[in-house]
Image (cartoon, rainbow, N blue to C red):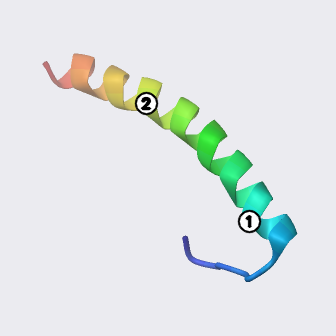
Amino acid sequence: MANELDDGTHETRREELGVTSARNVLPCLRRKQSITR
């Protein structure tokens, strides 16, 4: 994370973003793997 702020609100928001980003990244990685193979 580039900008880490010590805030409770930012922490929860970061967790939410982490979950959404993980859900978005995993399918992308699988697509890339299927494309490279």
Task: Residue 17 in the image: state x and y as whole percent.
Answer: 69, 49
Instruction: Check the image and report above or below for 28 versus 12.
Output: above
Nearest to N terminus: mark 2 or mark 1: 1
Residue 8 vs residue 13, the one in the foreground: 8
Q: What residue type is labelled 2?
A: Leu
For the residue marked with disc 1, what is the amino acid?
Answer: Glu
Residue at the image position 30 percent from the left and 28 percent from the top = 32
Q: How many numbered circles are shown?
A: 2
Counting other residues with Cα less than 10 Å from the Cα at mark 2, is it few (<14), some (14-19), or many (20 or more)? few
**x and y, in percent, of residue 15 in the image:** 68, 53
Element type where label 1 sits in the image: helix
Q: Which residue is drawn at 17% across and 25% down?
A: 36
Quarter of the picture containing the C terminus is top left
Quadrant in the picture for residue 35: top left
- CB-based contact (under 8 Å), mark 2 and mark 1: no
Residue at 35% x, 21% y is 31
Q: Where is residue 14 in the image (x, y as percent from the top left)?
A: 70, 59
Q: In this view, does 14 lie to the left or right of 18?
A: right
The image's mark for residue 11 is 1
- Whole-number angstrom distance, CA of label 2 to CA of label 1: 22 Å
Answer above or below: position of 5 versus 11: below
Identify which residue is drawn at 43% across, 30% down: 26
In the picture, the quarter occupied by the N terminus is bottom right
Q: In which quarter of the image is residue 3?
A: bottom right
Q: Report the residue that reaches farthest toward the bottom.
A: 6
Q: Is residue 23 left or right of residue 11?
A: left
**Residue 18 locus on image (x, y percent):** 61, 49
Q: Which residue lies furthest to the left in this view?
A: 37
Judge the density around disc 1: few (<14), some (14-19), many (≥20) Cα neighbours within 10 Å: few
Residue occupied by mark 2: 26
SS under mark 2? helix
